[in-house]
Amino acid sequence: MSKFNVTNTNKTTNRSGFIAYGMAEKEQLVTAVLTSMFGEPKYYGSTDNDIVRLASSCAGKDPLFLSKLAGYARNVGNMRSVSHVLTAIIAREAREYTRATIRNVVVRPDDITEIMACYLSLYGKPFPNAMKREIASVIQKFDEYQIAKYNGGSKSIKFRDVLRITHPVPKRPETEALFGKILNDTLETPLTWESTLSARGNTKEVWDELIASGKVGYMALLRNLRNIAKSGADIKPVLETLSDPEQVRKSRQLPFRFYSAYKTLSQEGLLTPALHLALEKALTASIDNMELIPGRTLIAVDVSGSMSSPVSLKSAIKCCDIAALFGAMASRICEDATVCYFDREWNEYRGYRIAHYGKYESILDICKKNAFYGGGTDLSLPMKFALKEDASVHIKPFDRVIYFSDNECNSSYRGLYKTVQGMAETYREKYNKNFWVHGVDLLGYGTQQFCGSRFNLIAGWSESVLSFIMLAESGISTLVKTIEEYEVL
């Protein structure tokens, strides 16, 4: 079996000031990128400067990897803003990869304006010629409706600015006409659900018309469930769309978006059994075809105080919500799972909660019930449970532990163990020499609590993180290797 991680002797301290292992630059960059709404604060401070520093370094050492990471972040990790940052850095530091990167990252028209605005923020003018050439090319794949919808309003970079800076040569007569409208500010005002609601009000009749027209996209339906439910509109076609597995796949929604809708509806007394079922189906659609994780699995969910930061200032979803959600999702694809929730070591066992979940229990209900407790972070508690001298624990050995955490352990270890890694080694000696540790990093602070062989570092807020558990154990791939093999256009 391939060993993806050699023994790491790079001891350091984490942001809490406690002992940890450092990461290689690529690992640091990947974990930070896939867990960052760029420009948003985190509990232990922003990782924005780390991302810019590490990406700039990577642009000099392995620009192809950085280009692939930008595309992976946008299209697999579903992280928009940070992919714009990486694209801007590539345009500045690795210009020969600008074309491929922009083609992978630009999915919507406003990706163009955001990339250019990001470049201005980081470096100022002038824009690199390679960047201008590729934007001049890629802008031509969008039509008038798309451009008008994302034209920018009062933002610093609008599509008129894009044309004046990049000077694209239109490839078709209709594109030439479109460019003329952009420059003359005569784009036809797009009839969108936003403009319709603004003009006519948030009423049952308006929503019924909008839903029947098919003009409200998947994301808009999901984020407006509260408004649709309150208006009294016919909810049936909305639920059919939201729960359709193919529509879920195309929507690129992060799993916590479904939990956010569920949470909002619950708080306002609008959650019906039909709504609940549709959101549950949508959430589970992405894991229904995942490979079963065989054997016995210990799932460790960090619900400590440092996991209480929201994913963005505008969101009510916290990182502990994502951890609890992933814990419940992972349990669904495990043959035999024990799920524990941990924060600080209150006393020997009170610091975590053990739960066994049946196959058909609602993931959303589990998440809501167990999302947050608070307190310090003691990552040794799940391993202490696994090592507990108790016959009920050792009916058969655990084959793996999966941590969903920020890895900011801030409790000192007493006695034999200096790090949690030592506890994993003891478990292998006593119970299962093939025991795996999977660390799913949810905040990307740049340190870890485990190292060496049979340790698999994962990061991100997309359900795709769960696929790396069996890929790593089978010796097929890891997250960094997958990004290295990601195909660019």
Image (cartoon, rainbow, N blue to C red):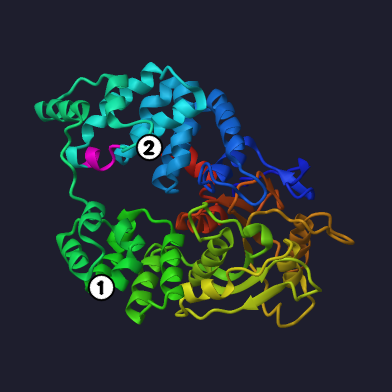
Residue 146 in the figure: left or right of residue 464: left
- Looking at the rendered structure, the secondary structure element under dot 1 is loop
- In the rendered image of this protein, does residue 230 appear above or below residue 310? below
Q: Is residue 478 visible?
A: no
**Mark on residue 202?**
none
From the viewer's side, name the closer residue of 434 and 60.
Answer: 60
Q: Quadrant of the C terminus?
A: top left
Q: Amino acid at mark 1?
A: Ile
**Mark on residue 235?**
1
Q: Amino acid at mark 2?
A: Val
From the viewer's side, name the closer residue of 253 and 210.
Answer: 210
Q: Give the x, y percent position of residue 292.
A: 47, 67
Provide the residue span drawn in magenta. Answer: 146-151
Q: Main secondary structure of the magenta part?
A: helix
* Residue at the image point whose x is 61% and y is 78% from the top: 355
Q: Quadrant of residue 250?
A: bottom left
- Looking at the rendered structure, the secondary structure element under dot 2 is helix
Looking at the image, the residue that sits furthest to the left is: 173
* Residue at the image point whose x is 12% and y is 28% from the top: 177
Q: Give the x, y percent position of residue 278.
A: 33, 72
- In the rendered image of this protein, does residue 16 appear above or below residue 357? above
Residue 339 in the figure: left or right of residue 154: right
Q: Is residue 149 magenta?
A: yes
Q: Give the x, y percent position of residue 357.
A: 54, 79
Q: Which residue is mark 2?
A: 105
* Residue at the image point whose x is 77% and y is 74% from the top: 388
Rounded to the nearest whole Å, what is the CA distance between mark 1 and mark 2? Answer: 34 Å
Looking at the image, the residue that sits furthest to the right is: 415
Q: Is residue 133 visible?
A: yes
Q: Earlier in the sequence, mark 1 or mark 2?
A: 2
Label 2 Cα neighbours within 10 Å, binned few <14 / some 14-19 / many ≥20:
many
Q: Mark 1, mark 2: which one is toward the viewer?
A: 1
